[in-house]
Image (tube, rainbow, N blue to C red):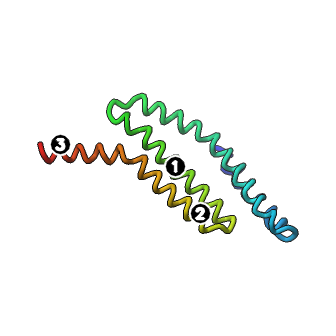
Amino acid sequence: MDTDIFRIAAIGLCGVILSSIVKGYKPEFATYVIITTVMVIFIIVIYKLTYVFEFLGEIYNQLSYGRNFFPIILKVLAVAYIADFTAQICRDSGEAAIAGKVELAGKVMIFYLAIPIIMAIMELLNYILTG
């Protein structure tokens, strides 16, 4: 069993406890503790993502159809995770308005990245319907 989830949980709990303690003395520094904790967790997760990308690379090399869409799907997933992660940090910092704008920007970027796939689907439908 991979123990990284225990390490992440421990870091998260330590961050929460430390943030609560700091909040009692210097409330303005509690946000920095939270952001630091989140960034440490993010670095651990990024390290694990290298294995995921190696796996996806193997799948990509085995594809015979749809190779053009695979990088687009990966970019869409990356934008979704980054936007969600950033919005959560903003909300935790009490900046819900900024979090909402980050989420909106993520949605717009996903739509922009998906345009080639939408066009391919439209072309396929047109080909099927016009025969």
Q: What residue appears at the point 55 percent right and 65 percent down from the top-left corner?
A: 100
Residue 54 seen in this snapshot: yes
Separation (CA) of disc 1 from disc 2 = 14 Å
Q: What residue appears at the point 59 percent right and 68 percent down from the top-left corner?
A: 97
Q: Is residue 112 left or right of residue 97?
A: left
Q: Quadrant of the N terminus?
A: top right
Q: Which mark is residue 79?
A: 1
Mark 1 Cα shell of 10 Å, populated few (<14), some (14-19), many (≥20): some
Q: Quadrant of residue 37?
A: bottom right
Judge by depth and name the residue closer to the eye, 69 or 100.
Answer: 100
* Residue type marked 3: Tyr
Residue 113 placed where, x, y %? 43, 46
* Residue type marked 1: Val
Residue 92 placed where, x, y %? 67, 65
Q: Is residue 119 above or below residue 29?
A: above
* Residue type marked 2: Ala
Judge by depth and name the residue closer to the eye, 56 or 117.
Answer: 117
Q: Secondary structure at mark 1?
A: helix
Judge by depth and name the residue closer to the eye, 19 or 82.
Answer: 82
Q: Secondary structure at mark 3?
A: helix
Residue 61 placed where, x, y %? 42, 28
Mark 2 Cα shell of 10 Å, populated few (<14), some (14-19), many (≥20): many
Residue beneath label 2, please?
99
